[in-house]
Image: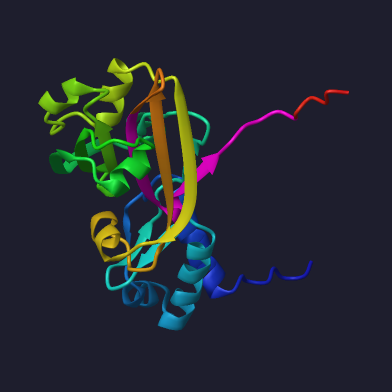
Amino acid sequence: MPEAVAAPLHQRILGDIEQKIVSGQWPPGHRIPVEVELARQYGCSRMTVGRALGQLARSGLIERRRRSGSFVAQPVAQSAVLEIHDIRSEVEALGLAYAYRLLRRRRRTAGADDRRRLGIDRPVPLLELACCHFAGDRPFCLEHRLISLASVPDASDQGFENVAPGPWLLARVPWSAAEHTIRAIAADAKIGAILDLPRGAPCLAMERRTWSRGEAVTHVRFVYPGESHALVARFEPARSGA
């Protein structure tokens, strides 16, 4: 029988790291040994190690952060585009711990841009909130929300330090209509700082407006790191009128 041909070294490195990730030995967020350490372990050049890590990054198993190293990638979360979902449920479905942080809370009167976002034509009082949701120790998404206090006056008395505004609203205001807009954007300096992304990194921005009995309730914009989130829509073929 012919002798088995040994796999190239970079494939062996790739296979070893992949096995540790798939088996759960290295969980999401685990920091992978640096290239110098792996090169020493396998007795090869950093170029060989870099080739293996590059292939793992392209496959989505790891993420390489500039000046920080390589880490096991978080699982890709999926949101149903046609549903109003709970971010905590999304995170916990990935098997990760959920956390929430309020970044800013401000009460003011709606300006022209606010009225456009809410779809109203009068300067109502509103509550502006900025929040960050976490999956494990990693930022999961950034939320910016406007709540019309004309429609939800009780929100004025809620601090939102310990509870996210989304589930609070869903529990109190029976929405009757919603509109979603989805865009691909690049992280600017502010988004990058909050989501721990380099400037220009691809992100998914989902904006939503909701109404209750014809009155505007809220406008919210969620920004997700593009490589760790997918939006899904389920639909059926239209029936022909013929």
- Looking at the picture, tell me which residue is in the foreground, 184 or 64: 184
Measured as percent of width and height from the top left, residue 130 is found at: 22, 44
Split into 4 quadrants, where in the image is the C terminus?
Answer: top right
Measured as percent of width and height from the top left, residue 188 is found at: 32, 64
Measured as percent of width and height from the top left, residue 222 is found at: 36, 44
Residue 142 visible in rendering: no
Split into 4 quadrants, where in the image is the N terminus?
Answer: bottom right
Residue under the image location 54 percent in, 59 percent down: 59
Residue 232 visible in rendering: yes
Side (left or right) of 87 relative to 158? right
Measured as percent of width and height from the top left, residue 157 is found at: 11, 24
Residue under the image location 40 percent in, 35 percent down: 209
Residue 93 sits inside the magenta stretch: no
- Looking at the picture, tell me which residue is in the foreground, 184 or 136: 184
Q: Which residues, given as a range, are shown in magenta?
A: 217-237
Residue under the image location 23 percent in, 25 percent down: 150
